[in-house]
Image (cartoon, coloured by chain):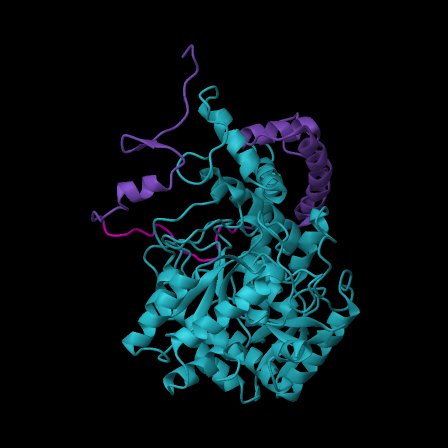
């Protein structure tokens, strides 16, 4: 076979089931590419060649390769715990920790016969939009090594866009799958909250965290989505409902026919009077994508969602509040590192020192902000008020979907990938990257990012949001957009490198 | 932070070095002098931005804690195996006699 890393999961599936290649060959091709490219890219935090090849050989021997995802390599964001495989969540505080159990999604991928290539880099505890908050190393964007790959799932986005993995899982709390997918030219989907298990996903903000697929094509993302989705009794927030039929929806969308579909363009996300912070190139590609939906037969209208403008302040109260509580478990007593335990200090001092040295600046800022927002006397004005705004945002979605649109669309990110370092010391500038992705996070509804072209040679994403449990609509629209463009956007990255 | 009353709508109390130090203590977080200086400025700006939620007219609106309306999700009351003790302790920074070993938890005079 020619370059196996250039193939999509669907193409690998066909080649494997036809016996044209083996899981070992496919795995080796990806490991070779990691060895050659990842020094510069920094997508992975941990790769175990021997374990991956042994696993691939096992799949080949079983004869399952090519059935479903069997024999296809995957990368996991380092936020998912994996039994015996180092898991850090991008933080020093978990350096060297090997979890005693695996996340449900990791187990499901294992059962599906996938081959784990490694764990991907991320902003520490998934807090960030650039992967620069990783305690270990920054990750670079395969389209331009001087730029960020998005975040917090930036290791996963760089790995898949750079062909260091055909598929990867990310997690999305406020946009951490969709934004990195957008700025690296990938498809990334945040499923309906509760439809993919959070068991074994190191918690950042429990009411918002959701795992989902990242891939170079819509169909690849759909296959990965169906492999991980569905009820899990180990997650008390898991919805007991069938997995949306996203593979079928992707197939249907690929015909390019959206006749009868009603699309709402959200005015508050880059529309008239709400364009501050949006790059012109992004708005141009977005307008073209909307025109393309119309050409495919969709009926497009503008929709107003007045509370979306408050999504950013509400999110940056709710997420840090939940984080300040969730991250209390990292105290150096039961797992991870411990600092200063020399017999002279009591437990409080050791905990404080461990957390001082174990956490990076963004994590500390959010713990402090969350502690403040939850303090007596401030709770109602901050956390309580943010939760009310969350209700208003959900009502905007309900009004739009009940009022006659099937999906809402916007740009995924107001800008293309920015230069590494440009926003590191300005938390508010970093947070602004999440402007378009936050409403769907707060309402728990599904949203996908699909590539819709380049601006100054860098990828732009279209976001498609749908009602809860109607993830299939996201995939259908995304597949139509992809089909209209003729080829996956990442093909252009490969051509550029050739 | 010096007052316990709820702040007025639109009025954002500034976060000074002392406030940050107090919050960090509450969160069991040692912070360096340099961090106190840096965080005071950065968190002041963030707090100004997030205080915009107070502009929303949301007096009678019910808060959303969670996007999925599920309550009291319980599993059957049946004992199931736990993780093996030695496997869990293997990941601990310090263990002794089949337990987590922790620093002194009481002061000398207690």
Q: Nearer the viewer, residue A99 or A243?
A: A99
Where residue B77 appears, as percent x and y from the top left, is 22, 48
Residue A69 in view here = no
Q: Colour of chain B?
A: purple
- Picture residue at 33% right of the left edge, 67% below the top: A111
Where residue A450 appears, as percent x and y from the top left, is 60, 74
Number of numbered tags placed on the structure image: 0
Inspect the magenta stretch and tell me whether residue A217 lies in it: no
Horizontal arrangement in the rendering, residue B17 relative to residue A249 (left or right): right
Q: Nearer the viewer, residue A8 or A277?
A: A8
Q: Which of A234 and A151 is in front in this view?
A: A151
Residue B25 in view here = yes
The magenta segment is: B64-76
A392 is higher (above) or lower (below) than B17: below
| Residue A334 in which image quadrant | top left
- Picture residue at 66% right of the left edge, 48% below the top: B53
Which quarter of the figure is the C terminus of chain A placed in? bottom right
| Magenta span dominant secondary structure | loop
A253 is higher (above) or lower (below) than B27: below
| Residue A239 in which image quadrant | bottom left
Q: Colour of chain A?
A: cyan
Where residue A134 appears, as percent x and y from the top left, is 59, 50
A250 is higher (above) or lower (below) than A430: below
Horizontal arrangement in the rendering, residue A320 relative to residue A239 (left or right): right
- Picture residue at 26% right of the left edge, 46% below the top: B82
Horizontal arrangement in the rendering, residue A168 relative to residue B55 (left or right): left
């Amino acid at each position: 076979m020619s370059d196996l890393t250039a193939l999509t999961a669907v193409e690998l599936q066909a080649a494997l089931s036809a016996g044209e290649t083996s899981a070992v060959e496919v795995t080796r091709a990806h490991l070779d590419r990691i060895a050659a490219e990842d020094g510069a890219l920094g997508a992975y935090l941990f790769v175990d060649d021997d374990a991956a090849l042994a696993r691939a050989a096992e799949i080949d021997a079983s004869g399952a390769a090519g059935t479903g995802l069997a024999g296809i390599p995957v990368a996991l964001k380092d936020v998912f715990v994996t039994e015996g495989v180092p898991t850090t969540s991008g933080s020093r505080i978990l350096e060297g920790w090997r979890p005693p159990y695996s996340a449900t999604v990791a187990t499901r991928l294992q059962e599906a016969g996938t081959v784990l290539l490694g764990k991907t880099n991320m902003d520490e505890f998934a807090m960030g939009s650039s992967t620069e908050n990783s305690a270990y190393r920054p990750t670079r964007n395969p389209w331009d090594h001087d730029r960020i790959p998005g975040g917090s799932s930036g290791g996963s986005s760089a790995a898949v866009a750079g062909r260091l993995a055909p598929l990867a899982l990310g997690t999305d709390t406020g946009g951490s799958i969709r934004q990195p997918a957008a700025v690296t030219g990938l498809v990334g989907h945040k499923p309906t909250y509760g439809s993919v298990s959070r068991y074994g996903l190191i918690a950042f903000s429990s009411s918002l965290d959701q795992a989902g697929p990242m891939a170079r094509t819509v169909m690849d993302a759909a296959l990965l989505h169906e492999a991980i989705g569905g009820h899990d009794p180990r997650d008390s927030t898991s919805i007991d409902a069938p997995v949306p039929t996203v593979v079928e929806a992707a197939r249907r969308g690929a015909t390019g026919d959206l006749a009868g579909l009603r699309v709402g363009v959200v005015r508050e996300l880059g529309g008239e009077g709400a364009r501050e912070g949006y790059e012109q190139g992004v708005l141009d590609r977005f307008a073209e994508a909307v025109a393309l939906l119309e050409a495919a037969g969709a009926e497009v209208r503008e929709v107003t969602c007045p509370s979306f403008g408050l999504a950013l302040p509400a999110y940056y109260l709710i997420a840090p509040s939940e984080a300040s509580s969730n991250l209390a478990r990292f105290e150096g007593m039961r797992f991870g590192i411990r600092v200063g335990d020399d017999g002279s200090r009591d437990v409080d001092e050791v905990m404080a020192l461990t957390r001082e040295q174990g956490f990076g600046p963004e994590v500390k800022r959010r713990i402090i902000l969350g502690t403040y927002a939850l303090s007596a006397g401030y709770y109602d004005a901050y956390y309580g008020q943010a939760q009310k705004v969350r209700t208003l945002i959900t009502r905007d979605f309900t009004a739009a979907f009940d009022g006659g649109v099937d999906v809402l669309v916007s740009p995924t990110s107001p800008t293309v990938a920015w230069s590494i370092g440009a926003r590191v010391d300005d938390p508010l500038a970093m947070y602004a990257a999440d402007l378009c992705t936050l409403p769907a996070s707060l309402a728990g509804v599904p949203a996908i990012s699909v590539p819709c072209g380049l601006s100054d040679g860098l990828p732009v994403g279209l976001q498609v949001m749908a009602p809860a449990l109607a993830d299939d609509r996201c995939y259908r629209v995304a597949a139509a957009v992809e089909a209209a463009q003729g080829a996956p956007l990442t093909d252009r990255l490969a051509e550029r490198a050739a | 932070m010096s007052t316990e009353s709820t702040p007025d709508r639109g009025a954002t109390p500034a976060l000074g070095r002392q406030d940050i130090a107090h919050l960090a203590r509450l969160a069991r977080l040692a912070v360096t002098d340099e961090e106190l200086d840096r965080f005071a400025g950065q968190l002041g700006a963030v707090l100004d931005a997030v205080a915009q939620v107070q502009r929303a007219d949301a007096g009678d609106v019910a808060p959303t804690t969670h996007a999925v309306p599920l309550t009291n999700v319980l599993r059957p009351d049946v004992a199931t195996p736990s993780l093996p003790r030695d496997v869990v302790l293997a990941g601990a920074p310090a263990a002794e006699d089949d337990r987590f070993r922790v620093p002194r938890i009481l002061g000398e005079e207690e």
